[in-house]
Image (cartoon, helix red, strand yellow):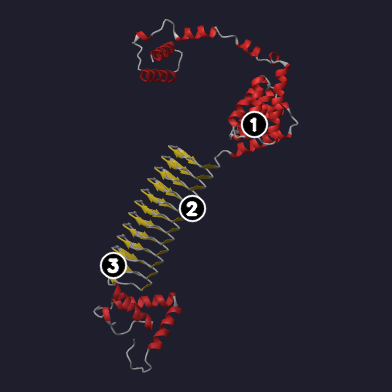
Amino acid sequence: MTDNKRLAFSIIQFLHDQLQGGDLSSSAQESLEVAVQCLETAFDVSTDDQSLAVPMTLTEIFTAATDKLPDQSQVNNNSTPNSVSEDQRAEAERLKTDGNDQMKVENFAAAVEFYSKAIAINPQNAVYYCNRAAAYSKLGNYAGAVQDCEQAISIDPNYSKAYGRMGLALASLNKHTEAGSYYKKALELDPDNDTYKTNLKIAEEKMETSSPCGSVSECGSVSECGSVSECGSVSECGSVSECGSVSECGSVSECGSVSECGSVSECGSVSECGSVSECGSVSECGSVSDCGSVSDCGSMSDCGSVSDCGSVSDSGSLSDSGSVSDCGSVSDCGSVSDCGSVSDCGSVSDSGSLSDSGSVSDCGSVSDCGSVSDCGSVSDCGSVSDCGSVSDCGSVSDSGSVSDSGSVSDCGSVSDSGSVSDSGSDWCRCLSVCSCSVSAGVVSDEQPSGPAADVGDDVWRVRGQQFAQQMQQQNPELIEQLRSQIRNRTPSTGNEEQP
């Protein structure tokens, strides 16, 4: 360990000398200072400990050692083909031929072994490296192919086949720009080679389509990005997190999680995501489907549809959506408005308001809502409770109970309800008077029996007349059917009381 500390001490001294030289940029100086601190910590040494100093500096030791090595030109001369005997060259050629035979039968691993043996005998033959590069490419070892092509080109700069195979290896590594330059060099050396022309054309087409990005797929994670924009698709990613913005994407699918994004906008579809959370806003999306949960979002607006979600919670607002369906629960939302339909939900609770919706159906319960207004129909709900007001709805049917509502008004029809209780205005009386109005087309001169008998003024008669006239105008065929049914049940004598 003492020798290692002495070596580390010498390296630290060398780095200090470089810092004092004054020829480095500020960033380079900072890097060296960090390196010194790391070495001192790793080897537990300090420049103050002169017991670790050696008589010579690291530079002097290096110079003395390299002076003993043979000159590089002499090394190259010793490796020239002239130093290889005729028998060795013949053996190397035989091994190359054996490698070629293995390539023909697609035994690429064996071919690599034969070419490697040929190179060991005659390392200055460019053909051997180029042939081994072809075998490496067949095995998918494109990095090895690139290295062998570089070696072949260094031996013979005019070897066109080495440039062509270098281009193929780089193209397989998706380095189409570099591949194109090597194809061009290959064509300069062999202008009539159709293969090089075809490969160059393919590389140029790949360069044109590679930007902006066509797709980002099968990524482990995409994190801390400023923006991801104008992409065709982003799929099968583990997680996408802490992005500034994701915009104008064709589709985002099969993601583990999308979290802490500034905004996600103008996307074609977002599907099969584990969770979408803590987003600033999600807007103008075609559809959001098959998500585990959508939570803590500022706003979700202008979406085509939101379906098959486990839960949608703690959102500021959900607006201008085509439809919201098959959700486990929708809770703690500021407002849900201008939706085409809300259906098959487990529960909708603690919402500020539900308005301008086409229909609300097959819900387990709708509770604690500020107001529900301008809906086409509300049907098959378990219970509707604690709502501020329910108004301007086409029909309310098949509900278990409607309770604790502030007011329920201007509804076309209310049918098959289990109970209607604790409403601010007497909905039951309205229904009773309206039933009498429909039966005759006008309100009877007599007070209606039952719940409306104690009205005490003409308010309910006026409302009944208005309702009957409205129904006569909107659906005369239905009114005629009701009248026909009433006539069939009416006794033949004219002095009987009207039903």
- Dot 3 or dot 2: first in sequence order is 2
Q: Quadrant of residue 393?
A: bottom left
Q: From what the image shows, is residue 477 above or below residue 26?
A: below
Q: Are marks 1 and 3 in contact (CB under 8 Å)?
A: no
Out of 35 and 134, give the one closest to the viewer.
134
Q: Quadrant of residue 43?
A: top left
SS at badge 3:
strand
In the picture of the structure, the residue carrying the numbered disc 2 is 286
Q: Please identify the quadrant where the C terminus is shown.
A: bottom left
Q: Amino acid at mark 2?
A: Gly
Q: Are marks 3 and 2 in contact (CB under 8 Å)?
A: no
Left or right placement of residue 266 versus residue 439 in this view: right
SS at badge 2:
loop
Q: Amino acid at mark 3?
A: Ser
Left or right placement of residue 346 versus residue 246 in this view: left
Out of 15 and 389, give the one closest to the viewer.
15
Out of 409 and 292, give the one closest to the viewer.
292
- Local crowd at mark 1 within 10 Å, few (<14), some, or many (≥20)? some
Disc 1 versus disc 2: distance between alpha carbons? 54 Å
In the picture of the structure, the residue carrying the numbered disc 1 is 110
- Local crowd at mark 2 within 10 Å, few (<14), some, or many (≥20)? some
Residue drawn at x 44%, y 19% is 28
- Dot 1 or dot 2: first in sequence order is 1
Q: Position of residue 307 (x, y in %)?
A: 44, 56
Q: Quadrant of residue 323?
A: bottom left
In the picture of the structure, the residue carrying the numbered disc 3 is 403
Out of 292 and 297, give the one closest to the viewer.
292
- Dot 1 or dot 3: first in sequence order is 1
